[in-house]
Image: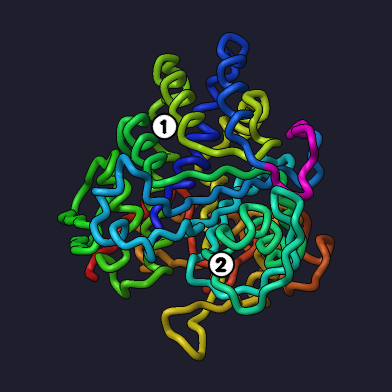
């Protein structure tokens, strides 16, 4: 039940606004009014948006997809939006996009919706302080305390490495509008995906997805092998990496009419936090990554295991996560051990020859011990993922 292409937001948000840099002055006034009017406060973030170039440790953006049964599209979702008891607004997709200092790298970390976490005491956008919660599913945090509680919980999960300064939320309707505006994204399907729950039916091969069909692809769980939330994360990352390739390879940013259309749709589709409700900040984020090679974008899943008491719930693997977050803190290249094989809802079929020479650090080791920022860090097998250069395909069979 977790669709959301906050991935789309991650990329389109960075995409769109990249090229928008040259025309931002012309349309800034309209954008500012739209963004500021709907923005929400992120507890602990600066009152004014910081300059991306001045951020120590880079920038961290929480992209959150929320399941909301909006009136003009709720008929598309059958029983999910017919029963009032099922209409809770859940943060079913949670991705933190880390944009590093120079040398510039982007790491997008997905925290699965079925992950059981201990939420710290958190401050809501209105300033209320809510008590800590033990053993709560991460996708219930938005309804509990808003985006601030989600952000503060993820900061704790990262051991303090991810200081989240920015955030944006997108609903089902926003996903539909954004995927239509971008003109569709071509994805590879390795094995048939047939899901009676979402209504998606895709044969093996290449498919250009947009609008509601793209949302079905991002939501599917039962159409994937294993029918798990982890499989869905892999499937969603297939779409995200294909979107990045389209943006970077097809010169989307040089098409001014497309840029303006995407920019306006993005602004209409998202609810940003206050620090992100500034076109200049969005342009800065985009400009920071627009010339990066595909190999420097890495999409990974936070490491998890099945909960001992419930196979449908997940628990954190903190030692494995510590290796990931240490590498991010040291701005090291990441080497994901997928070996071209299946993981979750994806199978990799690409050239792996561009990976940096790896070294395997201990979580407690220092930057000097690991040979400096140029050496790659081999991530534990539980930290699955890939780059857009890996040409991942969606794996059906549910």
The residue closer to the viewer here, 113 or 354, is 113
Q: Main secondary structure of the magenta part?
A: loop
Residue 219: percent from left, percent from top: 34, 57
Read off the residue under disc 1. 249
- Taking the image as shown, residue 224 lies to the left or right of residue 348, namely left
Residue found at the far top of this picture: 26
Residue 112: percent from left, percent from top: 50, 65
Q: Which mark is residue 138?
A: 2
In magenta segment, residue 384: no
Count the marks: 2
Q: Quadrant of residue 291?
A: top right
Q: Which residues are magenta?
A: 41-53
The residue closer to the viewer here, 196 or 123, is 123
Instruction: Choose mark 2 or mark 1, whichever is in front.
Output: 2
Task: Please tell me which residue is depicted at 45% across the width and 56% down the height of the picture.
Answer: 352
Q: Secondary structure at mark 1?
A: helix
Q: Please, is residue 20 above or below residue 237 in the view?
A: above
- Taking the image as shown, residue 272 lies to the left or right of residue 231, namely right
Task: Please tell me which residue is depicted at 60% across the width and 46% down the height of the picture.
Answer: 106
Lower position in the chain sequence, tag 2 or tag 1? 2
Task: Please tell me which residue is depicted at 59% across the width and 19% down the height of the picture.
Answer: 21
Residue 143: percent from left, percent from top: 55, 59
Q: How far apart are labels 2 and 1 at the CA level?
A: 35 Å
Residue 322: percent from left, percent from top: 70, 70
Q: Secondary structure at mark 2?
A: helix
Q: Residues within 10 Å of mark 2 (few under 14, many from 20)?
A: many
Judge whether residue 341 can be spotted in this image: no
Quadrant containing the N terminus is: bottom left
Q: How was the colour assigned to the protein in this rendering?
A: rainbow
Task: Please tell me which residue is depicted at 73% across the width and 43% down the height of the picture.
Answer: 58
């Amino acid at each position: 039940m977790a669709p959301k292409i906050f991935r789309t937001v991650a990329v389109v948000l960075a995409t769109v606004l990249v090229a928008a840099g040259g025309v931002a002055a012309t349309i800034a006034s309209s954008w500012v009014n739209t963004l500021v009017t709907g923005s929400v406060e992120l507890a602990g973030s600066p009152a004014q948006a910081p300059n991306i170039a001045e951020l120590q440790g880079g920038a961290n953006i929480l992209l959150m997809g929320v399941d909301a049964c909006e009136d003009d599209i709720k008929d598309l979702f059958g029983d999910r939006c017919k029963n009032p008891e099922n209409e809770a607004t859940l943060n079913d997709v949670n991705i933190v996009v880390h944009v590093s200092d120079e040398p510039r790298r982007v790491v997008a970390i997905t925290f699965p919706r079925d992950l059981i976490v201990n939420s710290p005491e958190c401050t809501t956008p209105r300033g209320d302080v809510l008590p800590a919660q033990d053993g709560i599913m991460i996708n219930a945090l938005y309804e509990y305390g808003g985006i601030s509680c989600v952000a503060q919980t993820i900061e704790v999960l990262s051991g303090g490495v991810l200081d989240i300064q920015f955030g944006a939320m997108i609903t089902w309707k926003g996903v539909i509008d954004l995927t239509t505006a971008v003109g569709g994204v071509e994805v590879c399907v390795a094995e048939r995906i047939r899901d009676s729950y979402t209504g998606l039916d895709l044969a093996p091969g290449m498919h250009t997805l947009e609008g509601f069909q793209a949302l079905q692809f991002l939501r599917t769980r039962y159409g994937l092998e294993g029918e798990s939330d982890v499989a869905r994360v892999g499937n969603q990352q297939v779409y995200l990496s294909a979107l990045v390739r389209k943006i970077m390879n097809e010169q989307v940013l040089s098409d001014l009419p497309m840029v303006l259309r995407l920019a306006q749709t993005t602004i209409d589709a998202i609810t940003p936090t206050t620090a992100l409700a500034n076109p200049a900040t969005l342009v800065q984020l985009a400009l920071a990554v627009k010339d990066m090679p595909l190999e420097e974008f890495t999409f990974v899943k936070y490491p998890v295991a099945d909960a001992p008491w419930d196979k449908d719930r997940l628990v954190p693997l903190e030692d494995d996560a510590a290796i990931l977050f240490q590498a991010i803190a040291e701005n090291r290249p990441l080497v994901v051990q997928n070996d071209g094989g299946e993981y979750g809802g994806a199978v990799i079929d690409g050239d792996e020859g561009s990976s940096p020479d790896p070294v395997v650090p201990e979580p407690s080791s220092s930057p000097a011990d690991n040979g400096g920022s140029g050496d790659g860090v081999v991530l534990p097998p539980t930290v699955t993922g890939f780059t857009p250069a890996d040409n991942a395909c969606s794996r059906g069979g549910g």
